[in-house]
Image: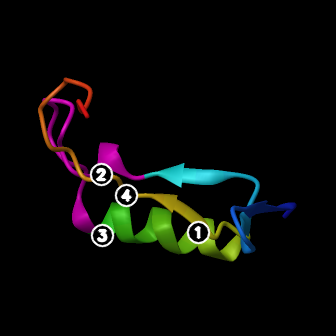
């Protein structure tokens, strides 16, 4: 897996896994917990080290400064 450097030296995989769909945040049912865990474990096996777990503050609205 290719790596990328963020900021002052944090190295992460070039491919990341967006985890918001694992939460039910898109008004759809959350996937089965066991399936979610299996997905994350497989990503780690494949070399993924970048997991996007951003907190949702305002449903479907961008944060404002």
The boundaries of the magenta stretch are: 19-33
Label whose residue precedes the other's in the sequence (2 or 1):
2
Disc number placed over residue 9 in the picture, else none: none
Please tell me whether mark 1 sits on a helix, a strand or a loop. Answer: helix
Q: Relative to 36, is 60 above or below? A: above
Residue identifier under label 4? 53
- Residue in the foreground of this view, choosing between 58 and 30: 58
Disc 2/disc 3 C-alpha distance (Å): 11 Å
**2 or 3: mark nearer the eye:** 2
Q: Residues within 10 Å of mark 4 (few under 14, many from 20)?
A: few
Label whose residue precedes the other's in the sequence (2 or 3):
2
Image quarter hosting the C terminus: top left
Give the percent coordinates (x, y) of residue 18: 47, 48
Disc number placed over residue 34 in the picture, else none: 3
Q: Are marks 2 and 4 in contact (CB under 8 Å)?
A: no
**2 or 1: mark nearer the eye:** 2
């Amino acid at each position: 897996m290719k790596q990328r450097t963020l900021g002052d030296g944090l190295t992460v995989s070039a491919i990341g896994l967006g985890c918001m769909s694992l939460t039910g945040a898109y008004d759809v049912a959350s996937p089965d917990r066991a399936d979610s865990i299996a997905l994350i474990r497989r990503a780690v096996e494949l070399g993924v080290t970048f997991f996007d777990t951003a907190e949702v503050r305002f449903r479907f609205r961008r944060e404002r400064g």
